[in-house]
Amino acid sequence: MHIRLLDLEDTLVWVLAADEIYSPKAGYTTLCAKRFVIDINWWWRGLWKLHCPAKAKLLWWSIMENKVPTWDNLQKRSFVGPGRCSLRSIDLESGQDLFMDCNVVKKVWV
């Protein structure tokens, strides 16, 4: 909200309408426009408040944002290397493969 300091009589100003005058229609239109705005990264708000080591939070954030330095991400940054999963040596290593699909990792977690 902007505060205007003038020697005039105070008035209510609705900055979300073109004429700066509030009307029920302007209020309804504003509410409807903001109703369907969804925060895509909703999960990270609570992540940083968790009581766990910072490195665990950073790892979880890296996994969720696909920022883990797996071979698919390193190749996008012009790194040269085998490009294969070091556990199975058959697929291109990716975050999805490493943390969700890899049978070797699933055995470790179980």
Image: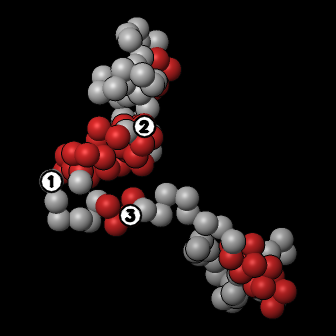
Mark 1 touches mark 3? (CB < 8 Å): no
Q: SS at mark 1?
A: loop
Most foreground residue, 102 or 1: 102
Q: Residues within 10 Å of mark 1 (few under 14, many from 20)?
A: few
Amino acid carrying label 1: it is: Pro
Distance between the Cα atoms at labels 3 and 2? Answer: 26 Å
Mark 3 touches mark 2? (CB < 8 Å): no
Most foreground residue, 73 or 11: 73
Q: Is residue 53 above or below residue 87?
A: below
Residue 24, given in percent of the width and then of the height, sits at 81, 91
| Residue, disc 3 | 45
Distance between the Cα atoms at labels 1 and 3? Answer: 16 Å
Q: Work out whether residue 35 can be spotted.
A: yes
For residue 53, which numbered disc appears in the image? 1
Q: Is residue 11 above or below residue 101?
A: below
Q: Residues within 10 Å of mark 3 (few under 14, many from 20)?
A: few
Disc number lying in front (1 or 3): 1
| Residue, disc 2 | 97
Residue 93, given in percent of the width and then of the height, sits at 41, 27
For residue 1, which numbered disc appears in the image? none
Q: Residues within 10 Å of mark 2 (few under 14, many from 20)?
A: some
Identified at 45% across, 25% down, the residue is: 91
Amino acid carrying label 3: it is: Arg
Mark closer to the chain start, 3 or 2? 3
Q: Is residue 26 above or below residue 51?
A: below
Most foreground residue, 47 or 83: 83
